[in-house]
Amino acid sequence: IRDEGLLDSALNLPFQSFDGEDIYKTIQAKAARLGFSLINNHPFVDGNKRIGILVMLVFLEINGIEIICTDEELVELGLGVADGSVSYKDLLNWIIDHS
């Protein structure tokens, strides 16, 4: 772990609330924020994209949502989030489209 604070932030961000209401209301929105934050916060020395995508997929699976895609699509998705060409909203829409 490169930065425990950034890891903690990325893991807690999807579950934030404001005035008693979840900011990220759906499982898909929480998963997208989780993956997006893990990739962009760079809390690990190496493997941030892989870990971000994997944690997102496991979170979805635990909550009964299966993603149907190829490994190549997942690689492109992780790279896109990391280079800024895939936004949080894009990631959320991708999850919705592939579930």
Image: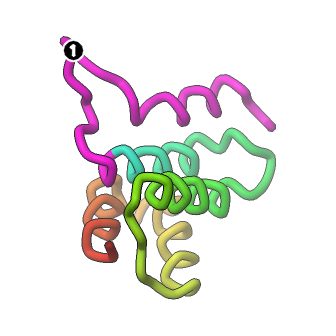
Does 17 sit left or right of 45 as displayed? left
Compared to residue 79, the image places residue 12 above or below, namely above
Question: In front here: 12 or 83?
Answer: 12
Residue interval drawn in magenta: 1-29
Compared to residue 5, the image places residue 95 above or below, namely below
Question: Which quadrant of the figure has residue 22?
Answer: top left
Snapshot colouring: rainbow
Compared to residue 63, the image places residue 61 above or below, namely below
Please rate how many residues cluster around mark 1, counting C-alpha atoms within 10 Å: few if below 14, some from 14 to 19, many from 20: few
Kindly state the secondary structure of the residue where label 1 is placed: loop
Q: Quadrant of the N terminus?
A: top right
- Amino acid type of the residue that numbered disc 1 sits on in the rendered structure: Gly
Query: How many badges with numbers are in the image?
Result: 1
Question: In front here: 74 or 66?
Answer: 66
In the image, residue 60 lies in the stretch drawn in magenta = no
Q: Position of residue 5 (x, y in %)?
A: 66, 23
Residue bearing the label numbered 1: 20
Q: Position of residue 68 (x, y in %)?
A: 42, 81
Q: Quadrant of the C terminus?
A: bottom left
What residue is shown at x 62% (from left), y 60% (from top)? 49
Q: Position of residue 34 (x, y in %)?
A: 47, 45
Q: Position of residue 14 (x, y in %)?
A: 40, 36
In the image, residue 14 lies in the stretch drawn in magenta = yes
Q: Residue furthest top?
A: 19
Does 64 sit left or right of 3 as displayed? left
Question: In front here: 71 or 2?
Answer: 71
